[in-house]
Image: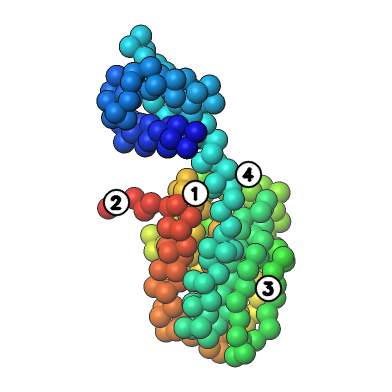
Amino acid sequence: MIQSVTRALDILEFLKLNPGGLGVTEIAQKLDVAKSTAHRLLASLEEQDYVQKTGKDSIYSLGLKFIEMAEVVTENLKIVDIARPLIEKLSRDTGEIVHLVMLDGNEVLYIDKVENASTIRIYSQIGRRGPLYCTGVGKAILAYLPEDEVDQLLAGVMMQPFTEYTLTTLEELKQEFQTIRANAFAYDNEEHERGIRCVAAPIFDHTQKSRYAISITGPITRMSDDILREYIPWTKETALAISRKMGFNPPKS
């Protein structure tokens, strides 16, 4: 039994390395077994959709089961567990609050928050929601979504002004998206809460989609223009590190 399992796993490895597929004879040679043994193993794998047979020459390749398995694995990736050590370090290095959020409907949902003794109490807390259009994390996510999806998400949203700095039209927001995409980060300049500023960056998953973001947030007394600029590379580097752990492969320039 153990030998059969090992051989079956070897077959899957061979097929992974040969995406064009292999015939029974080639597989038997690689396993150093009789052709009938290779055929029996392949028949069992095919029955369970781990391999598929194509063409009149019976070429075997990996089956659809692996798509299903990949989906289960990616669904079970725990973004909070993945991101936590990285955002803890970011908070230690900056002395400010670091947020992790996810896109949830037409809002952002705060799913983790790291703070220390020097941080002040602000609006956010884990489990709380915030608007997409006037938070740094919300804008960082929106900027990388397809335009039709942005239109759909914000269609029923009243873009009310939380402060005098809040952007309240979709046209203004889309104009800012161009800057966000060009620089790979977003600001919240007291747009959601007076006296609070942040720099945010998107997190991408294995499908190259942005559904998460992080931010460094603090009071305007500490978050000067110079400090915000200093935090930009740290925020972007941390977001990219989390993205990589989520299976994101940045496009080659």
Above or below, 214 relative to 106? below
Query: Residue at label 4?
Result: 152
Query: Residue at label 3?
Result: 124
Question: If you read the primary sequence from the N terminus, does the residue marked by circle 3 or circle 2 appear first?
Answer: 3
Image depth: mark 2 or mark 4 in front: 2
Q: Position of residue 14 (x, y in %)?
A: 33, 33
Mark pair 1, 3: CA separation? 24 Å
Query: Residue at label 1?
Result: 209
The answer to whether residue 137 is visible is no
Q: Are marks 4 and 1 in contact (CB under 8 Å)?
A: no
Above or below, 18 relative to 253? above
Q: Position of residue 221 (x, y in %)?
A: 56, 89
Q: Position of residue 101 (x, y in %)?
A: 60, 63
Q: Which residue is located at x 34 percent, y 18 percent?
A: 35
Q: Secondary structure at mark 1?
A: loop
Give residue 13's quadrant in the image.
top left
Query: Residue at label 2?
Result: 252
Question: If you read the primary sequence from the N terminus, does the residue marked by circle 1 or circle 2 appear first?
Answer: 1
Q: Secondary structure at mark 4?
A: helix
Question: If you read the primary sequence from the N terminus, does the residue marked by circle 4 or circle 1 appear first?
Answer: 4
Q: Which residue is located at x 61 percent, y 81 percent?
A: 115
Name the residue type under label 1: Lys
Q: Secondary structure at mark 3?
A: loop
Question: If you read the primary sequence from the N terminus, does the residue marked by circle 1 or circle 3 appear first?
Answer: 3
Image depth: mark 4 or mark 1 in front: 1
Q: Which residue is located at x 72 percent, y 65 percent?
A: 127
Q: Crowding near pointer 1: few (<14 within 10 Å), some, many (20+)?
A: some
